Image: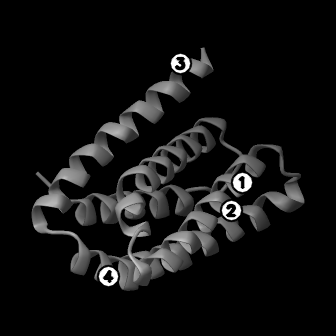
Amino acid sequence: MSDIYALLERDHQNLKSLLHELSSRDDDHLHTLSLELKAHTEAEETTFYAPLAIDAKAAGAVLQAEKEHKELRMLALDLPSASDDDFLATARSLGDVLLSHVEQEEGPLFARAREILSDEQAQAIGVEYERQKQLVKGRMHSRAY
């Protein structure tokens, strides 16, 4: 069983790959990107950020990460309706925000989290994170039909 750090790193890599492969307005690809981004950010906020937000040294970083999540979700929502001229610029902005977010999260925030959370807590949060992701995906899938 993977801990929360390994799961988040895996998902960050997956999101970066999805963005890297985004070269045109492929509806299936855009849907996959949006689904993965929404599931990741919502599950991360409820499972990983929640216990960190009560720590005075991590609270500011958590707040910033949540703002970045909101920006990422908004940019992903803008992609399908962006004009041809704006599509690549919006995709580039999404990539820039994602890379900056991942750098801050996997660096300082993970370091602080490792000071706060025990190995057992990190494992348990990982399990709950995966469960929450599946719930979000199920909700989004049922809305599509």
Q: Quadrant of the C terminus?
A: top right
Front residue (pair 31, 46): 46
Mark 2 or mark 4, which is nearer the start of the sequence?
2
Quarter-of-image position of residue 138: top left
3D distance between C-alphas at marks 4 and 2:
23 Å
Q: Residues within 10 Å of mark 4 (few under 14, many from 20)?
A: some
Label 3, secondary structure: give it: helix
Residue 70 lies, in percent from the top left, at 65, 58
3D distance between C-alphas at marks 3 and 2:
24 Å
Numbered disc in front, either 4 or 3: 4
Kind of residue at badge 2 = Glu
Asked whether disc 1 touches disc 2, contact meaning CB atoms under 8 Å apart, the reply is yes
Mark 3 or mark 1, which is nearer the start of the sequence?
1
In the rendered image, which residue does mark 2 sit on? 71
Numbered disc in front, either 1 or 4: 4
Kind of residue at badge 3 = Ser
3D distance between C-alphas at marks 1 and 3:
21 Å
3D distance between C-alphas at marks 4 and 3:
37 Å
Give the side of residue 41 with respect to residue 143, left or right.
Answer: left
Kind of residue at badge 1 = Met
Kind of residue at badge 4 = Arg
Residue 103 lies, in percent from the top left, at 45, 81
In the rendered image, which residue does mark 1 sit on? 74
Q: How many marks?
A: 4
Residue at the spot 47% in from the left edge and 81% down from the top edge: 104
Q: Residues within 10 Å of mark 2 (few under 14, many from 20)?
A: some
In the rendered image, which residue does mark 4 sit on? 112
- Is 63 above or below relative to 76? below
Give the side of residue 101 with respect to residue 75, left or right.
Answer: left
Label 1, secondary structure: give it: helix
Front residue (pair 41, 27): 41
Q: Residues within 10 Å of mark 1 (few under 14, many from 20)?
A: few
